[in-house]
Image: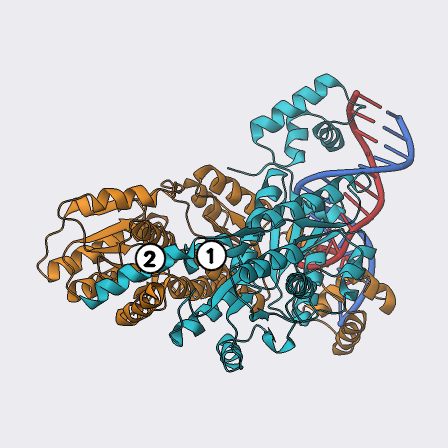
Chain colours: A orange, B cyan, C red, D blue
Amino acid sequence: METFTIKDIARELNISTSTVSRALRGSYEINPETKRLVMECAERLNYRPNPIALSLKGSASRAIGVIVPQIANYFFSQAINGIEAIAYNRGYHVIIFQSQESYERETANVHQAMSRKVDGLLISLSSETSDVAHLRDVLDKHVPIVLFDRVAAELGVTQVVADNFGGAFAATEHLIQSGRRRIAHLTIQPWLSITQERLAGYRAALEKHGLEYDETLIRYGTFGPDEVGPMVDELMALDPMPDAFFTASDRLAVGCLKALHQRNLAIPDDVSLIGFTNLNVADLLSPSLSTVVQPAQEIGQVAAERLIDLIEFKHRAKPVGTVKIPTELIVRDSTRLTEHAKHAGAAATK
Amino acid sequence: METFTIKDIARELNISTSTVSRALRGSYEINPETKRLVMECAERLNYRPNPIALSLKGSASRAIGVIVPQIANYFFSQAINGIEAIAYNRGYHVIIFQSQESYERETANVHQAMSRKVDGLLISLSSETSDVAHLRDVLDKHVPIVLFDRVAAELGVTQVVADNFGGAFAATEHLIQSGRRRIAHLTIQPWLSITQERLAGYRAALEKHGLEYDETLIRYGTFGPDEVGPMVDELMALDPMPDAFFTASDRLAVGCLKALHQRNLAIPDDVSLIGFTNLNVADLLSPSLSTVVQPAQEIGQVAAERLIDLIEFKHRAKPVGTVKIPTELIVRDSTRLTEHAKHAGAAATK
DNA sequence: TTGTAAGCGTTATCAC
DNA sequence: GTGATAACGCTTACAA
């Protein structure tokens, strides 16, 4: 299990390291016989090029940096899963950084990634990030960037996002069609692209069905701990109170569900809930609640694919643009939930 | 945002690169005044040592490799979160690899990590791994390893695990004390240390309360998709059927809950369920179900801490051993669930 | 106290 | 076709 270098092969074959290097990378101007010998020897010694030396040399490090706000978040961990799968297939390593939703840490992460000589960067912006100068520097050094989920159009790079508008529209319309009229919307920071797109989808659905857009039904979260309960309280104190919630994330959906539960409100009878969630989380919340499923893993896959194309072809890669991955509205039969609840309720009374 | 090297500082100050290098790392044998100048200049140019060059040189790369079976898994993503937090504080980067529960990929990951010259390795073994020769090679190269969660005592390295025995004992005892007698146990591959410890805890609790250990109530999963439903089916077909489930993971708890739900069985009335889960997942499953909370994040933190101690002190580090992080049995009032269900049930009938 | 030079593994640029 | 040599950024004997 010793680790051999190009030098060992050169010594073994009594040729120079440059010849070995050339043979290994299949240079034209090389004797086929020598090439064969080198290949055979490399095989035999189980030679693996040293990625560190390659990076130092300035050529490809075959590593991509991934910067996400939080690893321990279903959406991002699924996305990373997708990224890692593609990267592995195409021979890249993944170096992960967390920005912890902090602009400062995001900037530090970018620098660290650069000093590790990553071949490209996959970023989902922190909620604090409004200025993208730190990313401009990266592009200036010809290191490609692909943004995913939390994106910034002004950077002019390829972006991979869920169809937030479409998902929000479908969710809101579904709630309206099941008779809801005052649909509260719990979402995140208003300056984020995903927030705006979802809000737009929500408004478009209201408009289509002739419902008024009421600003007091919108609440913007800040990723603070235990912030959802108070938001729900405020909303439920409105008169008339909301009859449905549309939440922009797993975290908000869970918080909302908990808050409603604590207030002994039944879903779907007192209020309805529908959120952008990961499929697994949706199932956890309840196998009978409808949700808009975020294609987290696919977003990661597509983003990684685009980035590696950019790294490898540089020129021939697909043009810069925004790739929208469709979301899926899963409408589940909430009478099943009611059935289940009735059963449990009956059992409780015996 | 240009990136400066030790050479730039040397040129700026008209001294040699070696002097700069020594000043930067606070060597004794150096003129305090020179040192001050170098420091000042480094500060001004915002100098950052190039980690790649450091790695190539053979000294610290300030990167640690983390190999987990699956990133998109609540336990591991939380553990990684803990690892990343500690690593960041102590100035290390984290390079993540997924073994996908495959021995072959785990071996490949180990090699890749080594070729990236990681300073240490944090590993949770794949479920396929029984032979640890690939890790011996790493230790032979004096790269420290700390195992977490899925461990192998025969490797003789520090291990960080949850108190699986204690957690299983507490969970089982809780079920017994709430009147359950036929407690099924859904777990994972029997050769894994965590499986054995949990099974032992389960058996010990049965024994303490004079209940017979019935092998037919134990089911071993293999991480296959949709495997839990059939396992639950088999168990529910037993005569007498189980009156409780104790599951060894999030995934199994969720699968079990879904399967029971599909069969219209009420929890906690028809059967009880208690599982090793992440706190967030437990809350999702239901804010009213009891669970044994796995201290995922803390396991990650402690493991990272031990590994970095090993990397930095080598000799003065704490002795090799198994660190057991306590689990917490959270007993929640399942009458609240029942209350909620009753409410929903009543609403459903109107 | 500081400078010189070699070396980590690899590739690019020259020569031959 | 192949072989020296320098270079990437840094550390560390060894000299001075």
Q: Which residue is mark 1?
A: B282
User: Residue A140: x percent and y percent?
Assistant: 47, 46
In the rendered image, the vertical position of residue B298 relative to residue A326, given as above or below: above
User: What chain does badge 2 belong to?
Assistant: B
Kind of residue indicated by mark 2: Glu
Circle 1 Cα neighbour tier, 10 Å, few/some/many (<14 / 14–19 / ≥20): many
Q: Which residue is mark 2?
A: B339
Q: Mark 1 and mark 2, same subunit?
A: yes
Q: For residue A336, what is the image quadrant?
A: bottom left
Q: Is residue A26 visible?
A: no
User: Residue B228: x percent and y percent?
Assistant: 51, 75
Q: Is residue B287 visible?
A: yes
Q: Is residue B256 left or right of residue B96?
A: left
Q: Is residue A19 left or right of residue B305?
A: right
In the rendered image, the vertical position of residue A91 relative to residue B146, given as above or below: below
- Nearer the observer: mark 1 or 2; the answer is 2
| Image mark for residue A183 | none
Task: Look at 24% across and 42% down and name the residue there.
Answer: A234
Mark 1, secondary structure of its residue? helix
Task: Look at 68% across and 68% down and name the residue there.
Answer: A25
Tag 1–tag 2 contact (CB < 8 Å): no
Q: Is residue A272 left or right of residue A161?
A: left
Q: Earlier in the sequence, mark 1 or mark 2?
A: 1
Residue sitting nearer the eye, A166 or B232: B232
Residue sitting nearer the eye, A54 or B196: B196
User: What chain does badge 1 belong to?
Assistant: B
Mark 2, secondary structure of its residue? helix
Kind of residue indicated by mark 1: Ala
Q: For residue B108, what is the image quadrant?
A: bottom right
Total numbered badges shown on the rendered structure? 2
